[in-house]
Structures are given as C-alpha cells and as structure tokens.
Image: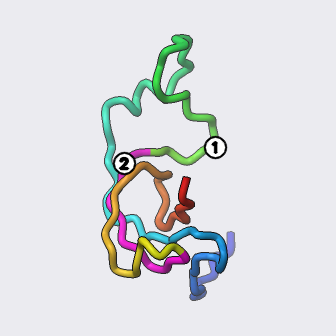
Amino acid sequence: MEIKISKIKLKAPKGSGAFLVKNLYLSCDPYMKGRMREIQAANYIFPPIVPGQALEGFRVAKVIDSDDQDFKPGDLVFGFTGWEEYSLIHKT
C-alpha cells in the first residue's frame, strides 16, 4: 500500500446553493444499533445501513465555504449527516 499526503482546497460548487462543512462532533446514539441489522418493521423510522455505506447521525459542524446566502464561513450548524470529515449540504 502506498500512502500519499497532499493538500486540496475544498469549495462549495458555484451556483449549487450548497455549503461545505467540517464536522466537529458526531453523535453515536442507541438507535444506530437497530440500523445495523435487517429491519422488517415497515414503520421503522430509519432504514438499515447498507454494507459499505457511511454511518449517519447527528453532528455539529462549522461552515467552511458557502454558495448559500443564509450560511457564512464560520457559522456553526447542527443536523443529520454521514460520519465523514467534510460534508456538502444542499438545501432541500
């Protein structure tokens, strides 16, 4: 295995209305255990995690770059996202 270290500049795509965040805190909650097995109940709120898919949960993050006028670099936000270092958030 070869490991390369390099620097990249992450930006929210222009015209996307999205904003880029650095996830600071990821919450590990009891409901996640239920998502790690096959769920048969049709009324279960969250679907099972697909093998190879990133875990998802609540997080606190800092806005790094934004193409959304409501979010500015430095803003702190919270919500639901994948367990990853950076997330690109699109308005819904």
Label 1, residues with CA under 10 Å away: few <14, some 14-19, many ≥20: few
Disc nearest the viewer among 1 and 2: 2
- Of the two numbered discs 1 and 2 on the same chain, state the one appearing first in sequence: 1
Q: Amino acid at mark 2?
A: Phe
Q: Does residue 76 appear left or right of residue 45 in this picture?
A: left
Label 2, residues with CA under 10 Å away: few <14, some 14-19, many ≥20: some
**Range of the magenta residues?**
57-67
Residue located at (43% from left, 24% from top)? 34
Q: Is residue 77 magenta-colored?
A: no
In the rendering, which numbered label is found on residue 88?
none
Classify 34 as above or below 8. Answer: above
Residue located at (58% from left, 76% from top)? 12
Count the marks. Answer: 2
Query: Callout 1: helix, strand or loop?
Result: loop
Query: Callout 2: helix, strand or loop?
Result: strand
Q: Does residue 61 appear left or right of residue 50 in this picture?
A: left
Q: Is residue 60 magenta-colored?
A: yes
In the rendering, which numbered label is found on residue 52?
1
Report the residue marked by disc 2: 58
Mark 1 to mark 2 CA distance (whole Å): 19 Å
Q: Main secondary structure of the magenta part?
A: strand
Q: Quadrant of residue 21?
A: bottom left
